[in-house]
Image: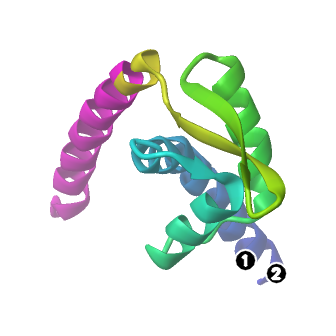
Amino acid sequence: MVEKANILKNLQQELRKGTLVLAVLSQLKTKHYGYSLVETLNNKGLFIDQNTLYPLLRRLDTQGLLVSTWEVVDPRPRKYYELSQFGKTILSQLQRDYENNYHVLSDMLKEEN
């Protein structure tokens, strides 16, 4: 029984990983710093750990999908992220792909065997 639980847990993690980039990009239409993005995602029901988010933000920034800037707010500097023009283009395409996959999968899951 433990084996089945581990298999399910691993598959759920894979499914989640496939949607995290889209979720993060969708929220960076407006500027956020890391912790505010964690709070936003958590408040919307997508719970994400900072140890997962920060490496993802760095990767997306390096890929040119984000624009990052340092700002000093309440005596401490914060790194803010928002979508670059390239990031907006990618988000739009990923959204179309996600919606297409969602509709196809929904139809497949509704099929009678």
Q: Which residues are magenta?
A: 89-113
Mark 2 residue element: helix
Q: Nearer the viewer, residue 95 or 100?
A: 95
The residues bearing labels 1 and 2 have C-alpha atoms spaced at a distance of 5 Å
Q: Is residue 92 left or right of residue 38?
A: left
Q: Position of residue 101 (x, y in %)?
A: 29, 40
Residue drawn at x 67%, y 32% is 69
Q: Which residue is mark 1?
A: 5
In depth, the one of 1 and 78 nearer the eye is 78
Determine which of the numbered discs, if any, sits on residue 104 in the image. Answer: none
Residue in the foreground of this view, choosing between 28 and 102: 28
Q: In the displayed structure, does residue 23 sit left or right of residue 2?
A: left
In the rendered view of the protein, which quadrant contains the N terminus?
Answer: bottom right
Q: Is residue 43 left or right of residue 56?
A: left
Tell me the residue that label 2 is attached to. Answer: 2
Asked if disc 1 and disc 2 are in contact, CB closer than 8 Å, the reply is yes
Where residue 59 sits in the image (x, y, percent)? 72, 29
Image quadrant where residue 47 sits = bottom right
- Is residue 80 shown left or right of residue 93? right
